[in-house]
């Protein structure tokens, strides 16, 4: 085989490998939900004091996923926060927050920082996220 033929074959193989990696990456990419998501911590708390939180991913699309899902890597399944953050601070890992503090630090601190910068933001009070339970 001549030099020109080897170059063509190398180029074709290179393009094929690049295409395969591109397709694999595109397939692995996780898409955030378009509809609001109800964060219900029944997997962590047997009895809850507050109502579940309705969270709109679409309102947070300017943020990088890792801002909230701090251990997540592209292509992996997104874990529920309660898989790592339990109801109380982790006794073995003192840096790992309990679930309530993890949520509140993540959400409220971000909202307060934006409010301080006079930017549009979400709620910082309890009832806006945890509406009162409707009486039956």
Image: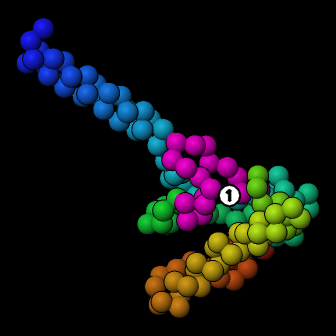
Residue 4: x and y, percent? 8, 18
Vertically, is 13 above or below 52?
above
Residue 95 in view: yes
Residues 32 and 23: in front is: 23
Q: Please state the extent of the stretch shown in magenta in the rendering.
A: 66-82
Q: Residues within 10 Å of mark 1 (few under 14, many from 20)?
A: few
Question: Which residue is painted at 78% across and 60% down in the image?
Answer: 85
Vertically, is 99 above or below 74?
below
Of helix, strand and loop, which mostly describes the magenta segment? loop
Residue 48 in view: no
> Considering the image in quadrants, where does the C terminus appear?
bottom right
User: Where is mark 1, residue-wise?
Assistant: 38
Residue 53: x and y, percent? 70, 65
Which picture quadrant has residue 47? bottom right
Question: Which residue is painted at 58% across and 78% down in the image?
Answer: 110
Image position of 47 (left or right of 130): right
Residues 110 and 52: in front is: 110
Image position of 90 (left or right of 65): right
């Amino acid at each position: 085989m001549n030099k020109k033929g080897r170059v063509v074959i190398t180029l074709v193989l290179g393009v094929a490998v690049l295409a395969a990696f591109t397709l694999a990456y595109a397939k692995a990419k996780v898409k955030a939900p378009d509809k609001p998501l109800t964060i219900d911590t029944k997997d962590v708390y047997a009895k809850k004091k507050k109502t579940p939180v309705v969270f709109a991913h679409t309102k947070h699309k300017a943020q990088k996923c890792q801002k909230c899902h701090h251990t997540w890597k592209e292509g992996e399944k997104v874990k529920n926060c309660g898989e790592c953050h339990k109801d109380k601070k982790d006794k073995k890992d003192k840096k790992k927050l309990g679930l309530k503090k993890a949520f509140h630090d993540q959400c409220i601190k971000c909202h307060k920082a934006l409010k301080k910068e006079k930017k549009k933001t979400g709620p910082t009070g309890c009832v806006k996220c945890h509406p009162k339970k409707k009486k039956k």
